[in-house]
Amino acid sequence: MPNFEYKAIKPDGSEITEVMEAKDSDAVTGYLDKLGYLPLKIKQTGGGISLKLFSNKRKLNDAEVIVFTRQLVTLLRAGVPLLSCLDALVAQSDSEGLKEIIQKVYVDIESGLSLSDAFKRHPKEFSELYIHSIKAGEIGGALDDVLERLVELMEHEQEVNARIKSAMRYPIIVVVSLVLAFIALMMLVVPNFIDLFDKMGIELPLPTRLLIGFHYLLSNYWYLLIAGVSAIAFGFSKYIKTEKGAFRWAQFMITVPVFGDLNLKTAMSRFTRMFETLNSSGLPILQTLDITAKTVGNVVIGKEIEKAALGVLQGAGLAAPLAEGKIFPPMVIQMISIGEQSGSLDTMLLNVSKHYDIEVEYAVKNLTSMIEPILTVGVGVIVLFLALAIFLPMWNLTSLAK
């Protein structure tokens, strides 16, 4: 269907400009009428720059999605019809973005779409995992249970990410402070020593020449340095978006010292919890593996899951194909194998997820203590370099005077 950009006045008097899919402009008008919006302009767009800008804008954050889902579960379990649930959530929501999306979902369901198909029209706000889980819940007639599991999964992900960010805050502050201090020394302190060294008239040692060279670059070619760093960052961001670059970066992220083990444990926790959530929802195992491969958060692990799906399709089970890739830890393979043999795969996956939750929590708590020696060595090297660069010429001058 074509895309239409519309401009309308909302019931509160504010203007809104958005892009939506519709078969024609009359469908857009009908949609706006149901929302109570007054249309000012509707035009078909071919998906140029303005469409890209609108489509990339995310209206909801993860916390809002979690709260919305939790409230929806409560209302559904109280026996409230789905449309009445959505209507009540619009009335009590403080988020304009959430209100707009719920209203659109309401209209889509009223026009005959299922809840999962209505959410599918908002891929920026609701992940593929979220949508397929709801679809499985609709098919199995256990939507509230599936939504409850989704909330637990999202809250778990949010908690883990918050822990990692908290642990990384200290190292980032130290590194940024160190870089700023180095630049300040280069620009404010070093020039005074350069004048002193010129008056000495002696041959300067290598550290001093390097220090003067750094100062010269920062003073005269700072714009080229900024441009160079920006170009490298831009090129790197483009490279890791390619298939080859994304694979190599994902491989690096699970093998790099200190962080690699944490990233692998986090991915294992995410994989087992997602798999358990989807599998217990009644989704076919091949579809579960396909969704998990796309949402596990690491391309290398995702590729291994895709290979395992082929093994399952050929009747080899899940544990054996996962073991061939040598990415998944032995404990994960063993627990999955036991689960397959005993018919309690979901229980085993949940146990593995809980185990890795504890491992991740322990690794995050010790992350700072592991990084501190590296930071200490880095600070020591920079201080030693500065000390040698500044004091070596003075020591040489003292030796000559004797």
Image: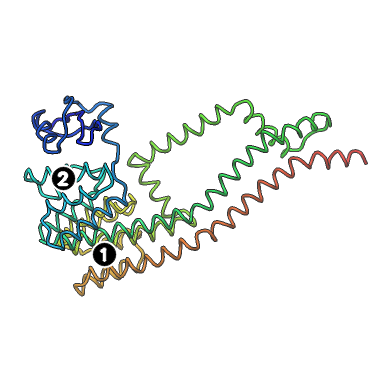
Quadrant in which the C terminus appears: top right
Q: Amino acid at mark 2?
A: Val
Query: Whole-percent x and y of residue 158?
Result: 35, 56
Task: Name the quadrant containing residue 238.
Answer: top left
Q: Looking at this view, is 285 or 192 the one in front? A: 192
Taking the view exactly as shown, the residue that stands out farthest to the front is: 12
Circle 1 packing at 10 Å, graded few (<14), some (14-19), many (20+), is some
| Residue 312 to residue 225: above or below | below
Query: Which residue appears at 31% of the width and 50% of the height?
Result: 62
Quadrant in which the N terminus appears: top left
Determine whether, in the image, residue 158 is placed left or right of residue 130.
right
Exactly how many numbered labels are in the figure? 2
On residue 320, the disc is: 1
Query: Which residue appears at 23% of the width and 57% of the height?
Result: 71
Query: Whole-percent x and y of residue 275?
Result: 24, 60
Question: Which residue is under mark 2?
Answer: 105
Q: Is residue 268 visible?
A: yes
